[in-house]
Amino acid sequence: MKSHLLELSYLVGSVTFILGLKLMGNPRTARRGNLIGAAGMVIAILGTIFLYEKPISGIVVGLIFAALALGTAIGWLTAKRVQMTQMPELVSMFNGMGGACAALIGLIEYPNYLGNPAALLAILAGVVIGSISFSGSIVAFLKLNGTLDRPLRLPYYNFINTVELIGVLALTFWLWQAGPAPCPLLYLLLAASLLYGVLFTLPIGGADMPVVISLLNSFTGLAAAFGGFLYHNYAMLTGGILVGSAGMLLTLAMCKAMNRSLVSVVFGAFGASSKTTVAAASQGQGAVKDIQPSDLAVLLNYSQRVVIVPGYGLAVAQAQHVIHELETLLESRGVQVKYAIHPVAGRMPGHMNVLLAEANVDYGKLVEMEEINPEFERTDVVLVVGANDVVNPAAKNDPGSPIYGMPILEVDRARRIIVNKRSMNAGYAGIDNQIFYHPNCSMFFGDAKKALAELVSELKSLT
C-alpha cells in the first residue's frame, strides 16, 4: 500500500512540475505556477519521508525536518531581502547548491553500487556534472557581484580546458569500467570536475553571462535527473529532466541571441576579449549631445510612437515603477508605447521581463527583438534606459568588436534616440557604444529613477 501511495505522490509531484513550468511561461500566471510547483515538491518530499518502503527512525526524521526548516528559513529570508539587481547572482548561488547536492549524493552512494554498472554510471555522471555546475555557478556568482569584475584567461586556455575535460571524461570512464576502485580516485574525479567548472567559467566575459547561467542551470537539472534515476524517484527524475531540457533550450536561444555556437560555449572559446577604453573607442566618433528633462518632455508629448529599451541600469536604479508611470502618462495623451526586450538584456535570461512585471507593466507591451526591429523605422523616439551593449551598432559594423555579429536592437534606425545613463562609461562588455555619437542621439544623463521622475513631472506640467 505504501509503495503505491509513494508512486502516486511522485506522479502528483511530476504533474505539478510540468504544470508549474507551463504557467511560468507567462508573467501573468508565473506566480501561480511557482506555487503549484512548490506544492508538488512538498508532496514528493513528504511522500519520500513517510511512505518509503523501509522505516526511517524518529531521530533521522527529526534531523531531516530540522534541515528542511533551516534551509527553508535561509531561502525564504534571502529571497525576501534580495534586490532585483542581485537576482542573477542569487539564481547562480541557488543553482550551485543544487549541483553540490548532486555531487554529494554521488560521493555517498558510490561504495554502495559498485556492482551495478547502470547505477554507477548515474552516480559518476552526477558527481561530474554536479561539481562542474557548483564551481561554475560560484565563479558566475563572483562575477555578477563584482568580485571578479573581468575575464581571466590563462595562456593557451582553450588547450588547457580541453585537456582538463578529456581527463575528467577518461577518469570517469575508468572508474565506471574498473569495478571496485580506490575511493581517493573518486575524490580526484571530484577535484578535477570542480577545477574544470572554474576554468570553464573564468574566461567568460560579462556580456555572455546570461548564456552561462542558463547552461549551468541545465547542468544542475541533468545532475538531479541522474539522482532520480539512481533512487527510482520519479519526481526527482521528472524535475531534473524538465530543468535540464528547459535550461538547454534556453541556452540555445541565448546562444542564438549572442551569435554564439554551443560548441564554443562548451569549449570555452567565447565571451572574453580585451576591453576597449571609452577614450580610445570614442576618438573620431563625433560630439555627444545632451538633452534636458523639459525638452525631452516636449519631444515625447508630441510623439506618436515611443519605444522604451530597458537595461540593467533600470534595475540598478529601481526605476521600473516610474518607467511604468511614464508609460501610463504618455498613453493617456495618445502616444503608443512599447518595450523592446533583448533576449540577453540584464544579467540573466528574462531579467527585464521580471523587472517590468514587478511594476505591473502589461506583458502585451513587451516586444521581442525580432518583432520590434522592423518597427524602429516608424518610431518617433526610442528611450534607452540603462541598456548599452544590446543597442551598440558595433555589433553590426565593427569586425574588431568583441560583440561583432551579435543581434542587437536596431535603435539607430529610429527618428530620435534618447539614452539615459549616469555617465559615458562603457557597458558590461567593456566597450564604448557607437550609438552615443549618432547624429540623432541625445544623452539624458542622471540616475534613472531621479531623471525619469523629473521627466514625468515635466510632462505633467504640459497642458
Image (tube, helix red, strand yellow):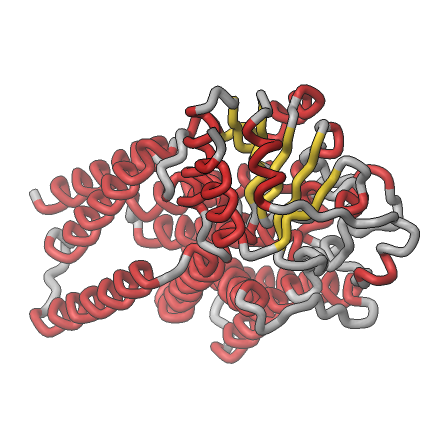
Is residue 279 depicted above or below 394 in this figure?
below
Evaluate whether residue 125 shows in this view. Answer: no
Residue drawn at point x = 52 percent, y = 62 percent: 137
Is residue 407 depicted above or below 116 in this figure?
above
Q: Nearer the viewer, residue 174 or 246?
A: 246
Q: x%, y% of residue 79?
A: 32, 59
Residue drawn at point x = 24 percent, y = 48 percent: 41
Q: x%, y% of residue 240?
A: 40, 46
Quadrant containing the N terminus in the rendered view = top left
When asked about the image quadrant of residue 358, the answer is top left
Left or right of residue 181: residue 435: right
When asked about the image quadrant of residue 252, the answer is top right
Residue furthest toward the bottom? 184
The total number of labels drawn is: 0
Q: x%, y% of residue 382?
A: 63, 33
Residue drawn at point x = 71 percent, y = 22 percent: 377
Q: x%, y% of residue 190?
A: 53, 71
